[in-house]
Amino acid sequence: MHKRLLWTLPVAVAAVIALPMSSALAAAGGTGHTVTQTDTQHGTWLEPGDTDFCTGETIAVTITGNAVQHVTFFPGGDEVWGTFTETGTAQAVLKSGLSYSGHITIWGNININKQNQNNTFTDSFRLSATGPDGVVHTEIGHEVAHMAWNAVSDQPVVSFDKMWITCT
């Protein structure tokens, strides 16, 4: 197994273990069969330590919405597939007094086998705030990041991270 798989496989396995074990045992159906699990969450969570792209301020974003994590693997094999989606309303208060609110969606995946691996991450957001002077401030952004490896090299064969932000 290549070095690149050594650091990502434990992450994928940890994600599987973090899901309720009772459903894993029920889904397993014996050695060699596919195990698939989906975990959903509804509610509010905090994303501390984020940076506001337009002001550079450290912020904590509160998201109220839904999160879904899905993992498929073979207990006796080397394949793991996983995906997650988080979507909901986001709120953040800046030191400057602006209180942003809006919508955010985050998606990611990972696919691993002994020959290949890839992971992709996307996020999109649209936030707005009205300042004390009545001026509406908006932050709109989108990011796509992707990495892929093959069995020939320890280095990614494809790697990019594209992000754009509009601040008004």
Image (cartoon, helix red, strand yellow):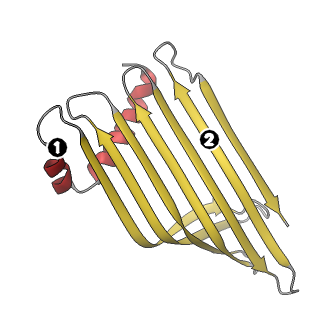
Q: Is residue 106 above or below residue 168?
A: above
Q: Amino acid at mark 2?
A: Ala
In the rendering, at what x and y percent does residue 20 appear?
23, 57
Q: Is residue 73 above or below residue 23?
A: above
Give the left or right position of residue 52, taking residue 38 as reference: right
Q: What residue is rendered at 64% in x and 57% in y?
A: 124
Q: Which mark is residue 145?
A: 2
Q: Which mark is residue 88?
A: none
Label 2 sits on a secondary structure element that is strand
Q: Earlier in the sequence, mark 1 or mark 2?
A: 1
> Front-most of 4 and 147?
147
Q: Residues within 10 Å of mark 1 (few under 14, many from 20)?
A: some
Q: Quadrant of the C terminus?
A: bottom right
List the residue tagged with mark 1: 28
Q: Residues within 10 Å of mark 2 (few under 14, many from 20)?
A: some
Residue situated furthest left in the rendering: 30
In the rendering, at what x and y percent does residue 5 appear?
41, 27
Label 1 sits on a secondary structure element that is helix
Q: What residue is rendered at 86% in x and 86% in y?
A: 134
Give the left or right position of residue 2, taking residue 154 as reference: left
Q: Nearer the viewer, mark 1 or mark 2?
A: 1
Q: Quadrant of the N terminus?
A: top left
